[in-house]
Image (cartoon, grey):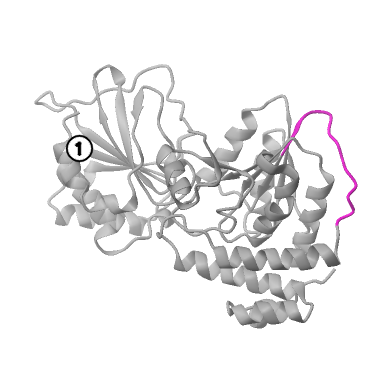
Amino acid sequence: MNPVSQGQLDGTATANPDHFDAALAQGNPALALEVLFTQALAEVRRGAGRGGLATGVLDAAGRRLLAHVAAATPTSGALIGFDRPANLYIVTELYQAGGHRVLLEQMIRARPLERHIVLFTGTLERTRDFSRARITELGAFAISPDPEAGLYDKWLWLREKLAAYAARRVFLLHHPEDVVAALAAEEIAPRYGHRLYLLHHADTVVSLAADLAGVTHLAIRPEQKARILAGNPDLRVVLMPLVAPLGDQPPKRAKRASGAVPEITVTCGNEKKFTLNGPLAFPDVIARILKVTDGRHVHIGPVSPAFVRATHRALTKAGLSPGRVAYLVEIPDLRPPGCVMVGRVRPRGQGFWRQLAETGSPTRRLFASRSDPMPSAPRTAWAPFRRRVARSGS
């Protein structure tokens, strides 16, 4: 083992590509991994909003590091079987508010007769107890590395687990900067092939392993699948549309005095999902939407008093009543973070939803129950949004 010291974390591991080459040349894979992680963090932050870009240079560097470590530290190769078909999930961590967790929970529930083992990478370690508790409640197995271990030791631990477990399928649900998850997927890709599923859930930021070859890429909306194939037509991309249960009863219809059916818009997620400034800031966008729809807006998820006050100020400035916006807690199985869904309630409880997405997995959710799924709108759709709604007659 070659644990990473605090000094390496604080000073030596920088985003300079030369430092990665130097660490690898010196035979220090632990430091090289820290440098790669630092570079990935910087690239993800720099690339926010650029639309699902792969980190080709960093992925190539990761393959060099993997070749070095695989030759110097081979895995034991001892296989561990299960009494039922087993599914492995490589996961960074889970959050209470956010669609990543909900998506994983739904995937586990979809196969109640199989075993489910969630391997947390330990790369971030911000919600360890919560993440493990949620998986255990589902009847699945939550396995995590020693929280005191360095990043390199956590990678070696994950390599051993993946080498030992004999699984039917492996799913990769990682944060874009999780270099440990990306390296693990790269190493097991030849073994599992198309039985390794890489879920695309946050295509608004760059992500490690986004164009991993030889595996199955899961897209959760048609537009996303088209974008992935446009960037790399050789990838195997499967559409896995998600739905939200809306119950047996149609939603109540609120009508204006004139008899017209109003527009109701909804945003979901905590306020950190809405970080844009200027004309695309949350309060200004909501005010512009309400000016067009003459309807109401509902926000689902935790927000601060300052967030509410900023929205109220924007509404007042636009000549709108702050009472047109309501704030609610989360709704089970309907937590698409960082999205705006624009819907018109129709007679007989039918409706459609259009999404203006920011990030997250169920952000891309297509509503299939009593609705007509519409392709997601790209981020650039904010500007012409009012014209499009004004022209819509349905």
Q: Is residue 337 magenta?
A: no
Tell me where residue 343 sits by quadrant.
top left
Q: Is residue 281 above or below residue 200?
A: below
Q: Is residue 43 left or right of residue 377?
A: right
Residue nearest the viewer, comparing 56 with 5: 56
- Is disc 1 surrounded by few (<14), some (14 to 19) or many (20+) residues within 10 Å? some
Q: Report the magenta stretch's main SS.
A: loop
Check the picture and name the quadrant holding the C terminus.
top left
SS state under label 1:
loop
Image side of residue 114 versus residue 378, left or right = right
Give the quarter of the image for residue 105. top right
**Amino acid under disc 1:** Gly
Please give the name of the residue rendered at 72% of the width and 68% of the height, measured from the top-left corner.
Answer: 65
Any magenta on residue 82?
yes
Residue 19 % position (x, y): 65, 81
According to the picture, the residue beneath numbered tag 1 turns out to be 295
Q: Position of residue 150 (x, y in %)?
A: 75, 67
For residue 110, say whether it is visible. Answer: yes
Residue at 90% across / 47% down in the picture?
Answer: 78
Q: Residue at point 78% right, 59% down?
A: 146
Relative to 233, is 82 above or below? above
Residue 137: image x %, image y %?
A: 68, 36
Coordinates of residue 47 in the picture (x, y in percent): 45, 64
The answer to which of 99 and 259 lies nearer the viewer is 99
Residue at horizontal 58 percent and vertical 33 percent from the top: 106
Tell me if 50 is positioned left or right of 322 in this view: right
The answer to whether residue 97 of the structure is visible from this angle is no
Could you say which quadrant of the image residue 354 lies in? top left
Q: Quadrant of the N terminus?
A: bottom right
Magenta stretch in the rendered image: 75-87
Which residue of the protein is positioned furthest toward the left in this rendering?
A: 258
